[in-house]
Image (tube, rainbow, N blue to C red):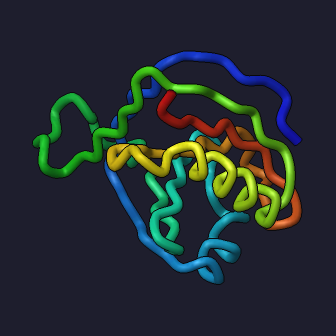
Amino acid sequence: MINAELYTEFKEVYTDKDTVNRVEFCKKLKKLKKDTVVELNEDMYCIYTRDADVDIQGQIQATTFQLEIEPAARVRFEGSLEEYECLLDEINKKSIRNRDFKIYGRLKDSNADREFFIMDVYYLM
């Protein structure tokens, strides 16, 4: 279910990236913390997390992941993994001509599973 759509910017820095297939993502979804960012890229899920013990400002540029979309639309998603993938397909249909098009989802609840989770989805306007 989509609750709202706003125009904003998305600028985040993360320290770790894990790329997994759909089966592995379903297993990891239950363990992901709030504010984890997810990107679906050619049937693989990129999971971006922050190491709480690391000072992001003090790290070398090459060891961080700079995620940015400006201007971005934000959609609040609530539903299952299958519904999430349908939403991403619909958003991707709008972006066929744009090579730099990115979609990031930020997990809003740490009690997620494949049947239900809440995520803010950001994509280029």
Residue at left 71%, top 42%?
Answer: 119
Q: Is residue 75 above or below residue 78?
A: above
| Total numbered labels placed on residues in the image | 0
Viewer-nearest residue: 4 or 109: 4
Residue at left 60%, top 41%?
Answer: 106
Q: Percent position (x, y) of residue 60? A: 11, 42
Viewer-nearest residue: 65 or 76: 76
Q: Percent position (x, y) of residue 122? A: 56, 35
Q: Furthest-bottom residue in view? A: 23
Q: Percent position (x, y) of residue 7? A: 58, 16
Q: Is residue 33 left or right of residue 18?
A: right
Q: Is residue 29 left or right of residue 96?
A: right
Residue at left 39%, top 48%?
Answer: 51
Q: Quadrant of residue 22?
A: bottom right
Q: Quadrant of residue 105?
A: top right
- Quadrant for the N terminus, please: top right
Q: Furthest-front residue in view? A: 97
Residue at left 79%, top 66%?
Answer: 82
Q: Is residue 100 above or below residue 122?
A: below
Q: Furthest-top residue in view? A: 7
Q: Is residue 71 left or right of residue 91?
A: left
Viewer-nearest residue: 14 or 8: 8
Q: Is residue 96 left or right of residue 119?
A: left
Q: Percent position (x, y) of residue 72? A: 51, 26
Viewer-nearest residue: 2 or 36: 2
Q: Is residue 125 above or below residue 39?
A: above
